[in-house]
Amino acid sequence: MKPKIDRSEIKNLQVNKDKPVLNKLSPYAFIAPHLFFFTVFMIFPTIYGIYLSFHSWDFFSSPVFVGLQNYADLIVNKDSLYFTYYWDAFKHTLLFVVFAVPLLISIPLLIAMAVDTKTWGSNFFRALFYAPSLFSIATVALIWIWMLDTNAGLVNYYLNKLGFENIPWLTDLPWAWVSIIVMTIWWTLGSNMILFLASLQDVSPELHEAAKIDGANAIHRFWHVTLPGIKNQMIFILIMTTIASFNIFGQPFMATKGGPGTDTKVLLMYIQEVAFTGSSEAGVASAMAIIMGFFLVIVSVIQFKVIGKEDKKA
């Protein structure tokens, strides 16, 4: 018995055969909108920024080619004010990264483990911890400025009630950095918590049960079962949090204005100041951004190298 031939299928095949160009171009049509915006807002600004980093430009006159002079003033010319202020800002940014990143990793992980249950109220607490990450940085900064104001802040009000003196949370060291780190943790812990919650779902419950049978307590299970089970996700979150922390801007810009003095002025604040205030040296600011981007690329390369090695071992 001969199989029946579906004439509609033959017709569709013939249509597809007659339109090979359309078949080849159709995937590009789907990615065209994203490719357009990626080119306009990522590729073009990056290329143009690299171009400007070799020029002197104040937004009003034509760019003047200066070669590597901008980079020399930032890297080797210690007599340049740009050198001094740039690396001071870099030091402040690195200080924030060193102290903030461990807390931005450990606190969301602990909260994720605490709410990783199916008990009543767990979804409420997940939403409660995640809610601050939905706020804009302006909203977050205004909330914490109101709370930490030295004379009229809510925190100092209750400290006075307990018999303590006012603490200059936003106007003196080390309190300014403590305030910036606290508001950053409060604002961002929800995002990392969600990522950790997703990674904890991949840890087999049977492994925890086997560890319990072998007599492992909660701490031993955390070190020998939970952490190895989320190792790859932990590396990803660590690297992405580090990159995001290097890009800190809004918290010190709005809360401390870089003070006291310039002790909380970070890299992006100084780049913005050089680019858009005073003499507006956009070329120097572009070189600053390129150098900063170079450090972030190194971090990203380390991320992919480490994750690649772990995948090969697995």
Image (cartoon, rainbow, N blue to C red):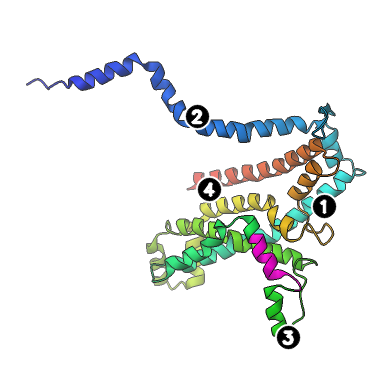
Q: Name the residue carrying label 3.
A: 163
Say which quarter of the image contains residue 183. Answer: bottom right
* Label 4: how many Cα within 10 Å (few below 14, some 14–19, many 20+): few
Amino acid, disc 1: Asp
Between the residue at mark 4 and the residue at mark 2, the CA separation in whole angstroms equals 34 Å
Q: Is residue 31 above or below residue 205?
A: above
Residue 300: x %, y % from top left: 62, 44
Give the Cα separation between the discs numbered 1 and 4: 36 Å
Q: How many marks?
A: 4
Whole-Å distance between the Cαs marked 2 and 1? 42 Å
Q: Quadrant of residue 149?
A: bottom right
Disc sitting over residue 249 in the figure: none
* Lower position in the chain sequence, tag 2 or tag 1: 2
Camera-side mark, 4 or 3:
3
What secondary structure is the stretch in magenta mostly built from?
A: helix
Work out whether residue 288 or residue 143 is closer to the camera in this orientation and state it.
143
Which mark is first along the chain, 3 or 1?
1
Residue furthest to the top in view is 18
Q: Is residue 102 located in the magenta-colored stretch of the structure?
A: no
Q: Amino acid at mark 2?
A: Ala
- Of marks 2 and 3, which one's residue comes earlier in the chain? 2
Where is mark 4, residue-wise?
310
Pointer 2 residue: 32
**Disc 3 marks which amino acid?**
Gly
Tell me the magenta residue range.
Answer: 140-151
